[in-house]
Amino acid sequence: MHKPKVFVTRVIPDGGLDLVRQACDADVWQEELPPTRLVLLERVRGVDGLLCLLTDPVDAELMDAAGQQLRVVSNFAVGYDNVDLRAATARGIPVGNTPGVLTETTADLAFALIMAAARRLVEGAGYVRAGLWRTWGPMLLLGHDVHGATLGIVGLGRIGQALARRAAGFSMKVIYYDPYCDGEKGVDQGAAVRCTLDELLAESDFVSLHVPLSAATHHLIDASALSKMKRTAVLVNTSRGPVVDSDALYEALTSGQISYAALDVTEPEPLPAGHKLLTLPNCLVVPHIASASWATRTRMAVMAAENLLAGLRGERLPNCVNPEVYEP
Ligand code: DGY
């Protein structure tokens, strides 16, 4: 029987990859690094479906290189800023993503970054490994309390709300700014109180970012935003790197405008070894691992496979980010 041809741009967990391999003639990119642009353009030629990652720019040129038989793009991520949705919709190609399954895991990491920053975990571990731990010290590695502090959540979507639930368990005061949320300013969303971005920046001890990347959120946290934060504040980013202006962040961290940044995502990404942010003792960077638990990545793989296979069968994707493709 003729199987649809698909390109899978990286090895994903078995639960999803097995589904794809059973139903498709699957070309799976085996390297650790993503296919280069040239390779991508070459490997998509003639495919019916593409299962791609946030590291693969999927634009009009790529879809045209694939050809007119391309009938689904399935992104192995909840974010889909790497896909030109307008170009996909114009070609009638549904685009799938993986919402929901990574919410709690991502919020776990955001909270871990808050804790690590406040209680100087990385410095503490480095201090011990360096053989510097000689006694209990009354002034040694003093940090800030998380309990009772004010957490400002920028973007109260699924992940922002999951973070707010964690914060409630630590008796934090939670405020949020969300341009897409209808509630009035000062009105509670659960235990979180809505405010303007300027109010959030001025009042928060921890500012955690949970907005998708778009033209409106690109460099949302720039020099001006950073200048409104407390000098003791910590910035946490598990959304997308370009939501923060890296140069402005470097200046704010070196001048003492804010005290610490804990970043899962960066601009550029990956951050090259030796990048100026990596020279700072008050900047913690981890390599975009917020959704990286075995269970969650397996669920994401299954969801991405289900989107791909539905699209190949001509069915509506279970999770489609451009549902307008189904409108007559
Ligand atoms: C996403 O899904 O958008 C994350 O950044 C990676 O899991």
Image (cartoon, rainbow, N blue to C red):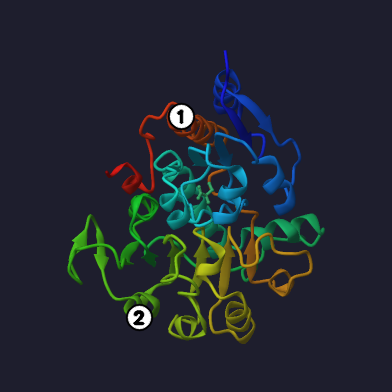
- Is 203 situated left or right of 219 in this image? left
Q: Amino acid at mark 2?
A: Asp
Residue drawn at the location 68% of the way across and 48% of the way down: 41
Between marks 1 and 2 in the image, the one whose residue lies nearer the viewer: 1
Q: Is residue 289 visible?
A: no
Q: Where residue 306 is drawn, which disc sits there?
A: 1
Image vertical order of residue 215 relative to residue 321, above or below = below
- Is 178 situated left or right of 129 in this image? left
Q: Residues within 10 Å of mark 1 (few under 14, many from 20)?
A: many
Q: The C terminus lies in which quarter of the figure?
A: top left
The residue that label 2 is drawn on is: 198
Image vertical order of residue 239 relative to residue 30, above or below = below
Q: The N terminus lies in which quarter of the figure?
A: top right
Q: Residues within 10 Å of mark 2 (few under 14, many from 20)?
A: few
Label 1: element kind: helix
Q: Is residue 158 visible?
A: yes
Q: Amino acid at mark 1?
A: Glu
- Across and down, in percent, residue 160 comes to 37, 56
Label 2: element kind: helix
Lower position in the chain sequence, tag 1 or tag 2: 2
Image vertical order of residue 130 relative to residue 228, above or below = above
Relative depth, front residue between 239 and 71:
71
